[in-house]
Image: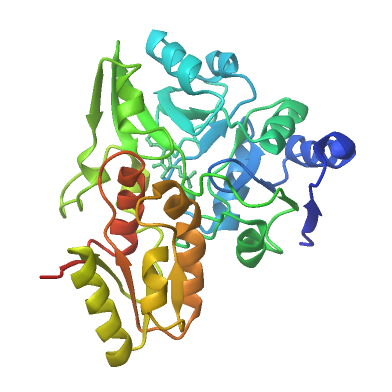
Amino acid sequence: MKTEIIRINDLSAQNGDLARAADIIRGGGLVAFPTETVYGLGGNATDDGAAKKIYAAKGRPSDNPLIIHIADPADADRYAAVNDTYRRLAKAFMPGPLTVILPRRETIPKSVTGGLESVAVRCPSHPVAHRLIELAGVPIAAPSANLSGKPSPTVAEHVIQDLSGRVDMILDGGPSEIGLESTIVKVDGDDEVTLLRPGGITYDALCMVVGTVHIAPAVTHALAENERPLSPGMKYRHYAPSVPVVLLRGEPEATLAFLMRAQDREKCAILCYFEETAYLKPERLFPVGARGDLAAQAHTLFRNLRAADRTDAEIIYAHLPPENGLGLALYNRMIRAAAHTVRDIP
Ligand code: AMP
Ligand code: MG
């Protein structure tokens, strides 16, 4: 398949390009597109065949459900049984990086939901994503636009690396602002949700709108052998580079000293803070942002993991992020990339 790549520089002047992308979606084809979280791989969410093409293009197991993307939060009603908790979440956080899991209506085929009776709904804020969904006139099922097991793509170049020749079109809208996938919550009942995946909408922000917010154990801990995850995606080893990732926990000076020694001793890649760059050798060094700048660290995480993985490093070191605020989303992604390997630096 020949993949057409279109750079979107001026959305208002490129309505024709977006209209063609929307035609591809309506016709059952696949279009990768930018969102504020990461790039998505889109197909018509009401079309069983399009869903199957998405799973095939990504090499994704077909029991790992897709998120459906809508242009207006009020449209959720056509595809899912909404309640007051959804409406409050939508009012507070949509359009934006929040996905809400609700009971599925028949308009969404089971192939999209991985066989589940629930469906995940999101309304992205990125102008290109928004226009594409609007013009398509159908909800767009879109997982992250990476090959299964690779880090989610945050620039079009990653999508091209993973999916060129496997999709009809890639829309290049520049780097994704947030850089981590959406926050996912499951509505449990009236005024009660469970956080399944942390993201740009933080736990604290959710608590301002919903009375009870549970955190699924798999957000911060490895699932035991016999444990059933609340979300199918939790059971897959995600976002993992091909060499081991080790997360370091310790005081700033001690951790920096460890990294300096590591560079002399082994072929390592390091995801370091800006403040540390002056003390470390530049080979295989990937500055992630200032120590306290979690937004920058989230924005650059997947790009840095991909880049570190492309070096000849035999091990990747990174700092263990805090578990509060946006840190929880970073923590959740990094602990998985590291297969829960944390090293304490005395
Ligand atoms: P991705 O779009 O690649 O970030 O993956 C979407 C994630 O959303 C998957 O890993 C799923 O586990 C989760 N998800 C989607 N739909 C549902 C659902 N109906 N119930 C639970 N989790 C879901
Ligand atoms: Mg994904």
Q: Is residue 273 visible?
A: no
Q: How is the image coloured?
A: rainbow
Q: Residue furthest left?
A: 346
Q: Residue 209 lies in what quarter of the image?
A: top left
| Residue nearer the viewer, 48 or 128 | 128
Q: Residue 334 lies in what quarter of the image?
A: bottom left
Q: Position of residue 225 (x, y in %)?
A: 16, 55
Position of residue 343 in the picture relative to residue 117 (left or right): left
Position of residue 26 in the picture relative to residue 286 (left or right): right
Quadrant location, ligand no. 1? top left
Residue at left 89%, top 37%?
13
| Residue nearer the viewer, 122 or 174 | 174
Tally the numbered discs.
Answer: 0
Q: Residue furthest top?
A: 84
| Residue nearer the viewer, 214 or 41 | 214
Q: Position of residue 236 (x, y in %)?
A: 34, 55
Position of residue 25 in the picture relative to residue 333 (left or right): right
Residue at left 70%, top 55%?
167
Q: Position of residue 78 (x, y in %)?
A: 57, 15
- Give the vertical position of 88 relative to 41 (above or below): above
Residue at left 53%, top 23%?
94
- Give the vertical position of 73 relative to 200 (above or below): above
Which image quadrant: the C terminus? bottom left
Which image quadrant: the N terminus? bottom right
Q: Is residue 182 visible?
A: yes
Residue at left 77%, top 59%?
3
Q: Position of residue 119 (x, y in %)?
A: 45, 28
